[in-house]
Amino acid sequence: MITKERERRFWERLGWQFLTEYKYGRPCNYWLSPDRNYFSGEPRGKNYYPPPIDLNNLFRWGVPLLDSYMMFTGEGGIHFIASKDGLNYEAIAEKEEEALFEALEEALEVQDD
């Protein structure tokens, strides 16, 4: 299961920033993308979560950091194999986005160490 804390750590590893600005004395929280073009938030003090974990966002922001990848359906569900710096990371899940998220998360954690 993908928790909000895992999501937050994942997006921060990809270069997203969680920022707070004050407008009219109220906090405005939002996420800013690495290219500084995509954000969400409004000046009503609401805390917006990171971008949703879906295939569009994962392929736009995470997959370009990999050397190569492969996704296929096999025993146990959807398999996603991510290659980064000569190492392979495999994740198996029922949903495509979960398998992709878990493989990317593992590759990025090892990269940061």
Image (cartoon, rainbow, N blue to C red):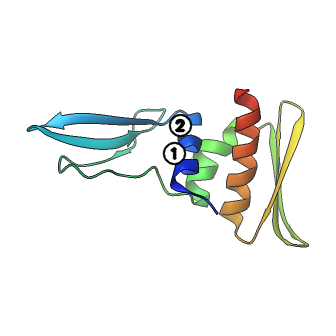
**Residue 23 got which mark?**
none
From the image, which quarter does the N terminus lie in?
bottom right
Check the image and name the residue furthest to the left: 24
The picture places residue 3, in percent across and down from the top left corner, at 56, 57
Q: Is residue 80 left or right of residue 11?
A: right
Q: Residue at x 76, y 50 (%)?
A: 103
11, 36: nearer the viewer? 11
Q: Classify mark 2: helix, strand or loop.
A: helix
**Residue 96's x, y, as percent?**
71, 65
Q: What residue would you read off at disc 1? A: 8
Task: Check whether the beta carbons of the residues at disc 1 and disc 2 lie within 8 A of each other.
Answer: yes
Please identify the quarter of the rendering in which residue 74 is found. bottom right
Residue 2 in the image: above or below residue 5: below
Quadrant of the rendered image containing residue 105: top right
Three-letter code, disc 1:
Arg
Q: Which residue is mark 2?
A: 12
- At 61% from the left and 59% from the top, the residue drawn is 2
Write the residue at 50% across / 57% down. Answer: 52
